[in-house]
Image (cartoon, rainbow, N blue to C red):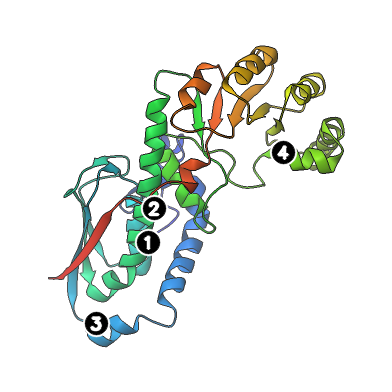
Amino acid sequence: MSFHPKCDSKLRNRGWVRGKWGYFCVMATNNRVHSFRNWLAEDLGEGDHTTLATVASSVRGTASLLAKSEGLLAGVQVALDFFSFVDASLTATVHMRDGERIRPGDRVFELSGSARSLLIGERVALNLMQRMSGIATLTDKYVQALKGTSAVLLDTRKTTPGFRWAEKEAVRIGGGQNHRFGLYDRILIKDNHIDHGGGIGPVLDATRRYVANKNLTIPVEIEVRNRAELQQVLDLGVGCVHRILLDNFSVDQVREAVEWIAGKFETEVSGGIHLGNIRAYAEAGVQFISVGALTHQAVSLDLSLKTVME
């Protein structure tokens, strides 16, 4: 399969391009082949000795992916692309797509071809689909809690090493949006930077110089921990800061801070956000709410992948 397929103009505006069996996200394209190679190498090592010893190369089979629990499906496209990476001759019949709600017994897809290829790829594919579906399902719960408000749900960098792009894709499938992908696509000045950089004034001055010298166009965000720090950013951040991150503010503190900011900067809140209070934060007027729990507290969805001989 080609990992650089022709783009669909309508979907490209939303970050997706057409693949062999559907659409995948442009952001993840450069990481996919690298990830597939690493995931396969981790599991395969010098070879699947069990399969090579017991299953002849001529044997063909069909693998069926079935749902065993309720939730929001995610990782279908990634799993299909991974199997295509393992063996491009495999053929797929797809019954359900990413973002669909599943119930126990739902059949998601079937793959047919070399039994060896199906057995080699099954565990990695199942792991990633269970993980991504769990994240998408949890994200959807947060999105539903925000329904009717204008707040945007964001993820964080609290992701599994080597699996970030897939977990962030799962957040998007669940209805959330991605915050920065890494340290390179947004300047986010946090408490440690402020403390080590000499305070808000010095770090903002240094950031202005750095952005100008590097000719950067990425957004600048700064975290504040209290009213005093917020006031400093309001006084000194114009022309440099795009968004203020209110860290561990209470709902009442957020409401007050939003009034002070008065639309001069974008607003975001993080820290201590959960399903029980996220709507109250949204109703306090903040524009963005970042929740690390989307990725670091999601429980994998129960799926099965059964292979039978043709």
* Disc 3 packing (10 Å; few <14; some 14–19; many ≥20): few
Mark 2 or 1: the one toward you: 2
Q: Nearer the viewer, residue 186 or 57?
A: 186
Q: Nearer the viewer, residue 8 or 218?
A: 218
- Inter-mark Cα distance, 4 to 3: 55 Å
Q: Position of residue 259 (x, y in %)?
A: 65, 12
Identified by mark 2, the residue type is: Arg
Q: Position of residue 211 (x, y in %)?
A: 78, 37
**Which mark is on residue 82?**
1
Check whether the beta carbons of the residues at disc 1 and disc 3 lie within 8 A of each other.
Answer: no
User: In the rendered image, which residue does mark 4 sit on?
Assistant: 190
Identified by mark 4, the residue type is: Lys
Q: In what element is the residue under mark 3?
A: loop
Identified by mark 1, the residue type is: Phe
Residue 300, compared with residue 16, is above or below; it is below
Residue 302, compared with residue 248, is above or below; it is below
Image quarter of the N terminus? bottom left
Give the residue displayed 63% in from the left and 31% down from the top.
248
**Which mark is on residue 57?**
3
Mark 2 or 3: the one toward you: 2
Pick whichever of labels 1 and 3 is earlier in the sequence.
3
User: In the rendered image, which residue does mark 2 sit on?
Assistant: 131
Mark 4 or 1: the one toward you: 4
Q: Position of residue 31 (x, y in %)?
A: 51, 56
